[in-house]
Amino acid sequence: MTHNSILQISDSEGLGRFVLFDGLSHQLLLKPGIYGNPVLTTQAIYFLDQMESIGHISSESPIPPPDVERLVDNYLFEFSKIHSSSRMTFRTSDARFWIDERSSMYSLADQMLTDTLALDRLNDRSVLEVAATDPKDTINFDDWNIGVNYANAAIADHVGNISSLLEKKVDVRVMPNEERDGHLGKLRVIKARAAYIDIFQALALQDIDARAMQPTRDGTRPTYFPLATSKTFGVVEELSIERITTNKQYSPVLLSHFFSGVKERNPLKAFLAFYNVLEYYFEEAPTRLRRNARSELDQLKCVIELLATDVDFANQLSGDASDWRGAIASNLVTSLGPPIARVDAAAASLCDEFSRWLYEIRCAVVHSKKTRRGITTSSFEPYSAASANIKVALPIVRWLAVLCIEKDQALTNPALV
C-alpha cells in the first residue's frame, strides 16, 4: 500500500513549477499547492506567483519524521545552491496541517474554521442513510465528502462566472491626450497580469506524485506535465519540471544552522546563522592546515582558507552578475561607533581581507559594548535602519556557508566526492 507524506514547506510562494528530487532513499516532489483545505474561502482563480508549495513523498511504508526531515533538508540544500535567492525550508513554527477526529461526522476545512459533513455510507456500516432534504439537490451521496461536494457544485458556477468575466469585452472610443494614447475598438474589462490556474486544477495538484513524472518507455524524461483539463478562460495548461539529483547527505547540524539563516528575515540573525556554519570548523580548520590560531579572527582565516582561495574570491568579484563589487565598495555604516572599513579588492590576500571584514561585522552584531579599552566600538542596533546594511554581506557569508557544508561532507564521505 502506498503511503503519501504531504509536507509543509515554508517561504515557498511563487515556485510555479514542479521540482523532482531523486538520488536518496526516496524521491521528493515539490509542487504548487493550497493549504488549509479551503471550502467557504475557496477562490475561483489562483495566481501561480502567490501559490505556496507543498512537498510530496510516496513510499511503501510510513517514513519516520527524523528521516523525512533529513531527506527534505538535503534536497532543499541542493535546491538552494542552484537558486541562491530561495528561502524555502522545512522549518516552520506555524503548522498548517491537522488530523480530523475519526469519531466525528464532520471534517475540518478553511484552516479549521469550518466543519464539512463527511459520512461514508458505502463503507461505514453505521451509516444507514444519507439523503437530500431538497429534491432539487443532485449531489452524489456515495462520495463520503458530502459537505465539500455541495460546495464544489456552487464553486463550479462561480468559476464559470469568473471565466466569463475574463472573456468579457466592451467597445471603447477614447481620444488621445497628453497622458495616454487613444483607443478605438474592443478592450477586456479584466486582464490578468500573471499566470493562473482555477481552483479545480489547483486541487488536482495534490494527487500528483513523483511516479507520474518518471521517464517514458523510450527513456525520455518529460520536461512539462499537463494539469487537469479546465474550461476556464486563459488558465495555464501545463507546468515545467525541474529535476535535481543528488546522492550526498550533509551534516544535520550544519543544515540546521544554514536553513535558520535562509529562513530568517532579520539580517542580523541571518548573518549569525550562516556565520555559525563557519564557526563549526574553527578548531578543526587550523589543525588541518597545521596552523596556530591564537584568536577567533585567526580561526576564521583558517576556515576560509580551507574553503576557498584568493582566485575563488576574485572570480566572485569579477563575475558578470556579481553583486559583491557594490557590496564591498563602501564602508559599512553601523548603528553606533565607526563604520566597518570596506573590503580592499586589491589586497595581497583576499581570503584574509574578507575574513577581517566578516569578523568585524560579526563583532558589531554580537557585541553591544559602548567602548572597548576606552575606544568607541562599532555595533548594530536590532531593527534599526543601519541593521539593514548587513544585507550586503549575506550573499557572501551564505556562499561560504555552502562551501563549508560541502567541505564537511567531502571530508566525512570522501568516496562521494
Image (cartoon, helix red, strand yellow):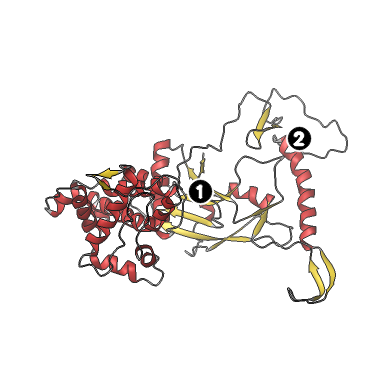
Q: Is residue 92 left or right of residue 187?
A: left
Tag in front: 2 or 1: 1
- Which residue is the extreme one toward the right? 135
Which mark is on residue 81? none
Where's residue 139, x and y in %? 79, 39
Residue linked to disc 1: 11
Could you tell whether 144 is left or right of 283 in the image?
Answer: right
Label ID, residue 141: 2
- In front: 219, or 40? 40
Neighbour tally class for label 2: few under 14, some 14-19, many 20 plus, Cα within 10 Å: many
Q: Quadrant of residue 140?
A: top right
Q: Residue at x 77, y 55 (%)?
A: 162
Which residue shows up at 66% across the image and 55% down it?
A: 228
Q: Amino acid at mark 1?
A: Asp
Does the image show residue 49?
Answer: yes
Q: Please state if 101 lies on the left or on the right of 177 as rendered.
A: left
Identify whether 135 is placed above or below 349: above
**Residue type at mark 2?**
Phe
The residue depicted at 57 percent of the width and 31 percent of the height is 99
Please identify the quarter of the rendering in which residue 391 is found: bottom left
Point out residue 41 in the picture as x, y percentages from the top left corner: 70, 42
Query: Is the residue marked by circle 1 packed among few (<14), some (14-19), or many (20+) residues within 10 Å?
Result: some
| Image location (x, y in percent) of residue 130 | 77, 29
361 sits left or right of 65 in the view? left
Q: Earlier in the sequence, mark 2 or mark 1?
A: 1
State the SS at label 1.
loop
Secondary structure at badge 2 equals loop
352, 199: nearer the viewer: 352
Q: CA distance from mark 2 to mark 1?
A: 38 Å
Q: Quadrant of the C terminus?
A: bottom left
Please, is residue 402 above or below residue 37 in the view? below
Question: Looking at the picture, does residue 23 appear above or below residue 182?
Answer: above
